[in-house]
Image (cartoon, helix red, strand yellow):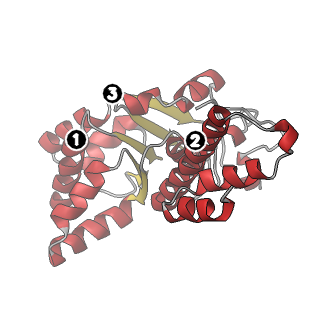
Amino acid sequence: MLTHPTLDQLNTLGLTGMACAWRDLAEQDPNAALSRDEWLALMLECEASTRAEKRFSNRLRAAKLRFPNACIEDIDFAAPRGLDRRNMLALAQGGWLKAHENLILSGQTGTGKTWMACAFGHQAARLDHSVAYMRMPRLFEDMAMARIDGRFPRLVDKLARVQLLILDDWGTHSLNDQQRLDLLEIFEERYQRKSTMITAQLPVSAWHEMIGEATIADAILDRIIHNAHRIELKGESMRKKGKITALTNSEKVETIAP
């Protein structure tokens, strides 16, 4: 059997998973030899698994999450934050992403909104969705610069195409006329096509006033709120209690089936 030339060909074709499976199978006991069909099935399964892992790693790297290691399984439901375990695990299945619905995480500072948003972003990447994380101040800076150097249409197109856009620190300051129009442009392009996740200290009832101009505020909120799931985190700041690491609890792990 021409093992090495075959391995070279598999690697040249980028079939690294199949090459790894070939190598492992070739080293097995000849008395326990598998049929050709079984060989092929195992090699294809290993290749599919390898490609899925690469896609996940690439999506996670491209997302630029603030907490890339945050994951749904590590959420500490014992912390007094008003979390509904059943609702959280249902959202982790990703049906809202397939339906192009939104998710709003609200609560006081330090209650874990950003960490939890990153956990949902991690889960979305695991479910093979593209993800992008941006803080609102940075988003407005990027859009202002893009208008100056002519990249604005490309930036809007990039934001419109990502399957889950995470907007962190929503409502930390009032908006000017251009920022209102930019947000409307983004949400118009994404409405019923992609999902958006928003974290905010400001309660949803105050968003209209924060946005400012009534007509544009109505248009923006109409595209965000009416098809959005909401999670309101309650309780005191975890930082005040010196429990930043207690946002997760490694001893209580929930297994999420993709």
Query: Separation of disc 1 and disc 3 at Cα?
Result: 12 Å
**What kind of residue is marked 1?**
Ile
User: For mark 2, does the 10 Å Cα neighbourhood hold few (<14), some (14 to 19), or many (20 or more) residues?
Assistant: some
Snapshot quadrant of residue 81: top right
Q: Which residue is mark 2?
A: 44
Query: In this rendering, which labeled residue sits more in front, label 1 or label 3?
Result: 3
Query: Separation of disc 1 and disc 2 at Cα?
Result: 46 Å
Residue drawn at the location 58% of the way across and 47% of the way down: 47
User: As rendered, which of 203 and 165 lies closer to the eye?
Assistant: 165
**What kind of residue is marked 3?**
Asn
Q: Which quadrant is home to the N terminus?
A: bottom right
Q: Secondary structure at mark 3?
A: loop
Q: Position of residue 103 (x, y in %)?
A: 43, 36
User: As rendered, which of 39 and 239 lies closer to the eye?
Assistant: 39
Q: Is residue 27 left or right of residue 137?
A: right
Q: Is residue 51 left or right of residue 181?
A: right
Give the numbered dot on residue 220.
1
Q: Which residue is mark 3?
A: 227
User: As rendered, which of 163 and 14 lies closer to the eye?
Assistant: 14
